[in-house]
Amino acid sequence: MKESSRQTLAGNLDLIYRTGNFQFSNKLTINYLKTNDPVVLFSEYAQANPYYRKYNADGGVDKYLYNPNEEEETPVPNPLWNARLNNYDRSDEFGFTNNFIAEWFATSDLRVRAKFGLTKTSTTAETHLSPLHTDFDSMSDTEKGSYENSQTKETEYEGDLSVTYGKLFKDVHMVNLVGGFNFSNTSSIMNGYKATGFTEDQFSAPSFANSYPVDGKPSYSESTTRAVSFYLNGGYAYDNRYLLDLNYRRDGASMFGSSHRFRDTWSVGIGWNIHKEKFMSGTHLFQWLKLRASVENPGNQNFSAYQAFTTYQFNSLMTNVFGAGVLISALGNPDLQWQNTLNYTVGTDIALLDNRISVTLDVYRKVTDPLLAVITTPGSVGVKSVAMNAGKQNTNGVEATLRLGIIHNEEKGINLDISLNATTNKSKYAHLGNSLSALNQAGQTSVTGTTRYYDGGSPTAIWAVRSAGIDPATGKELFIKKDGSYSFDYDVNDEVVVGDTQPKIEGVLGTTFYYKGFSLGAYFRYQLGGQIFNTDLYNKVENIDLSDINYNQDRRALYDRWSAPGQEAQFKGISMVQKTDKSSRFVMDENTFSGESFNVGYEFLQPFIKKLGLSSLTLQANMNDMFRVSTVKAERGIDYPFARTVSFSVLAVF
């Protein structure tokens, strides 16, 4: 997009030192990113009415596309005017990561490894709007224009100490053990301020501002999270036929309530390499045939720093003889605990016909109990919400991958593979009761909220009132009630499941081709059997009023509406300006097919690169998100266009 840029600079420095049984290594990575984004979003251009002139008779740009004489009408801003002003939205980020690793190879079977890493990032963002911007038309001269500055500093350090032991006994017993502990600390500080009132367009520095916003003050926030883990992982294999894996962790994290800081996570897996059995030695059909099963309960620490703590904020309006007053900013929950998930998986890996066909199949079940939810609280509590554990979620699914080796000729250097991945799953809530009834009520009254939380319901289900379409006689929408009767009156209590955004099946189709140094890869993503609530039809065809006609609207708002008795139409009559409610009329089947990734490369042959003094030379071109086809016509990339990335690289090894 015009006026949008990303400038990146990165460097790596790896140092390795070996002496005796010791090895020391240090990996340093430095990154710098400078961004510049347009203040006028692409959506403002898309919203502009194409019937208005972009330029005036002299070829210049006016401030308004439409400036009425009547006081009751509102002028329509010209996005080209705002784009030409001295506005900016920019940021720069600098950071580095340094990892120091020390290893002691005590014996051929025993190794001790220590690691300490430090990451530090600093980001500064600035946004300036010119006083001539149309957003300030109704303000006084001393309030026009704005400048915002925000700074974020983040520091993270982590350490790990592990002992690894692996040995083969009597040629049939293989044992692997890894034990250790790790710790991490992440802290961040964010602060910023805003200034208003600029006299001239060309003066954008904050020193030219007249004042701070009325009742405004600088912003500041900090957060610190800490975590520690003790772990022991073990593996045993008998004659490479029977396999056993055991993993145990004791995890602690500061994000959770004081009553539930630590929890145990573990996993158990078994496997059977059938192709290694003696009764399989006489057949050449299978090159790999393995059965496996596992059960685990992974932990989840992806929560905010102070979610379990009650926090306060000062209020200058409550200052008294005892000092400044405080208000509760967020209500903590000391009993907040980790989401507990049990994953059960049974699978098989198969390779046959000289590895020309390979299949991987997994059947799994996930049980998450309890879930973590943010509950809306009554206004009398003084805070908007509180985090708590509520309910249970069950997920059953199947995932399969098929790879076909169409051509495999080592003598001529030709390889052609085709792979197909497919997955399907279904999820349901349980044990919720009425704990999330406030969220359900909020969703019913919201403009486009279609998610509900009920026992037996799907997390991805679309809830709305069923629609029988537009009545040809009156142009009104006819709704289907829960008992099957029809009514022109919309009732949120008639909501049912009318679709599900989770596809029935999705996956990736890929192919790779190699011929004498030339390589080609293409990967396509598909989704079949899901539904979508088309918000574009809902917002831009029916939910428009007289104030919206000055802006660009969907042509179906005029041509596909009901206009005469007896007419069959998809949308209500244009004379009806009342609010359109959420119904199944806007739910559509969505099947998609997209070109996710393409790559082309060439590796030069050895005799040629030797003349250049190289050991290898490879050229590579990559393309991402090149196209997307969908059965639903909906707007995508309106605020900021989707990026179709093309990159080229050269890898030379001396």
Image (cartoon, helix red, strand yellow):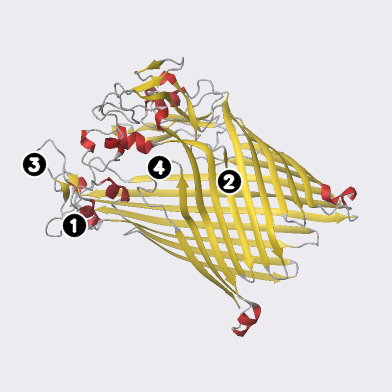
Query: For residue 294, which quarter of the picture?
Result: top right
**Dot 4 surroundings within 10 Å: few (below 14), some, or many (20 or more)?**
few
Question: Is label 2 or label 3 in front?
Answer: 2
Q: Nearer the viewer, residue 79 or 587?
A: 587
Which amino acid type is marked by label 4? Lys
Q: Distance of mark 2 from mark 4, alpha carbons?
A: 22 Å
> How much space separates mark 2 and mark 3, taking CA atoms?
57 Å
Q: x, y percentage for residue 121? A: 46, 57
User: Who is closer to the viewer here, 427 or 563?
Assistant: 563
Residue 458 visible (yes or no): yes
Q: Position of residue 193 (x, y in %)?
A: 30, 49
Q: Residue at x 23, y 44 (%)?
A: 213
Above or below for 269 versus 438: below
Q: Earlier in the sequence, mark 3 or mark 4?
A: 3
Type of the residue with mark 2: Gly
Q: Residue furthest bottom?
A: 611
Q: Residue at x 35, y 58 (%)?
A: 4
Q: Residues within 10 Å of mark 2 (few under 14, many from 20)?
A: some
How far apart marks 1 and 3 lie (CA) works out to 27 Å
- Tag 1 or tag 4, which sits nearer the N-term? 1
Q: Which residue is mark 4?
A: 633
At mark 2, the secondary structure is: strand
Q: Which residue is mark 3?
A: 69
- Where residue 533 sits, quadrant-wise, is top left
